[in-house]
Image (tube, rainbow, N blue to C red):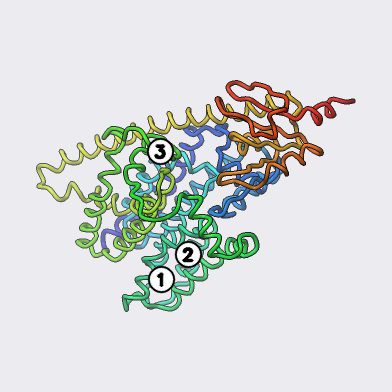
Amino acid sequence: MMSIRAGRRPLGTLPLVLTAAMFTLAQLGLVKTGMGLGWDETVYVSQVSSHAPPAFFSAPRARGISLLVAPVTSWSSSTSVLRAYLAVLSGLGLFLAFRAWRNMFPIKVLTLGAALFSTLWVTLFYGPQAMPNYWVAIGALAGAGYFARARSAVVDRTALWGVAAGGALMAWMRPTDAVWCSLPLFALMATVRTWRRPWPFAALAGGLLSGAAQWVAEAYLSYGGLGSRLSEASRIQGGLGWNIAVGDQLRSLGGRTLCRPCTGQIPGPEVTGWWLLLPLLAALGLVTAIRLGRAASTSLMLACAATAGLPYLFMIGYAAPRFLLPAYALLAIPVADALIRLPGTVSRGWRPVVTVLLGIALSGHLVVQYVVLERTVQRTTAAHREWDRTADQLHHLSVRPPCMLTGYQALPVAFYAGCSSAATSGHNANSTPGEIVKATAWTHVAVIVAPGAKPPGYARSWEAHRIDDLRVYIPPTYRDQSRQP
């Protein structure tokens, strides 16, 4: 207890504030505000944007991220403004999530944990994006922290509100992930007498239910029930079951934002080393916590990290590095605790050596994370610019709003072009060939065909145009009408 008080007295939470501010600045400087929106981002943003009609919203998605970005996207189509807004919010979220543990760990541990989590390339990359996984991580870490505080026999209203807010944020963003992250908390309340208190249970259950209410209601209104929506979500994700995706996650660490199908070589140890060391460092964090009398708090984080990562490591047939952001956030504090205490585990003469070696290792880790981030940003920006260029060329072909696109990468290109999108098959199927043909009577329609592929039967007689390596088919009748004065 003395070490906690000594760590908090000089600067309070100022180091944590500075770490969060640096995280925001790093996003603005390294991720680039003009990167453009990704595929999933266009789906979420289109729900609350005047730039394009709402894209098809598949069963696994939740509308939390759409509502989070609505204050900006409802009046501005600027990606730069949106990125800056999310960078500031993510910095604030980082501070609040780690601050939730301030009475249980020294500020130096929390600051190092925040620094470790916020300097991962995947955290920096997704912090300013309109994607839900980072916010699940923030909700999971903050909620677990307030839950640990709420176990006291004295009712802590602030902690109870924190538990509810963390649960609501997770469920608001991804209800199924919220359940996985919360399993250890419910298990503790069900099996351990000292954790069996009604108010934390009510706060957690209430937060989860309030966050997931819209998703559940939508399941009954649009999917035929909660079971049907969960089944459809599982189908879209390849069918949840026993699928070992550890190797897929390792492959994605090199900067692959979606590894589906996940083939190719696993990156070298300079890229994957930190990931492979995580279980060992987490175990060392637990040993440290036992020695310092904070085993309960550390065990809680480790258990939540394990259940948060379980479905994405062993129950899904593909990988994306963002899936494990909640686990990384929950592991950050125990790992930081272990690293800070590590020099003290050797003899006094070796401590400077161990400290220097740790500094070198962490510096090398930062360099690798920066290199992966830079390459990922460059590759992603180039892909988004191709979509923007395709949309611009479609405008030159008189495919302008109101319009509808279908075919290869039609969903993101449609957002860039200000069009709606339609698909007759796949995870985003929302139309039929007949409905697309009927739409040509009242709107501009274009079919985008991938290199080497054939157009659908209904479009083979349409005018063919080339945009880079793509071919675009446009019905001649409506195109001729659009040219008339």
User: CA–CA distance between discs 3 and 1?
Assistant: 33 Å
> Which image quarter is the C terminus in?
top right
Residue 330 versus residue 482 in the image, above or below: below
**Looking at the rendering, which quadrant does residue 80 occupy?**
top right
Q: Residue at x 65, y 63 (%)?
A: 221
For this view, does 24 lie left or right of residue 3? right
Q: Which residue is mark 2?
A: 162
For this view, does 16 lie left or right of residue 65? left
Residue 320 versus residue 242 in the image, above or below: above
Q: Amino acid at mark 2?
A: Gly
> SS for tag 2?
helix
Q: Circle 1: is it few (<14), some (14-19), or many (20+) Cα within 10 Å? A: many
What is the number of callouts on the image? Answer: 3
Q: Are marks 2 and 1 in contact (CB under 8 Å)?
A: yes
Q: Observer-nearest residue: 225 or 278?
A: 225
Q: Along the polypeptide, which appears first: circle 3 or circle 1?
A: 3
Q: Which residue is mark 3?
A: 121
Q: Position of residue 349 (x, y in %)?
A: 9, 42
Q: Which mark is residue 150?
A: 1
User: CA–CA distance between discs 2 and 3?
Assistant: 28 Å
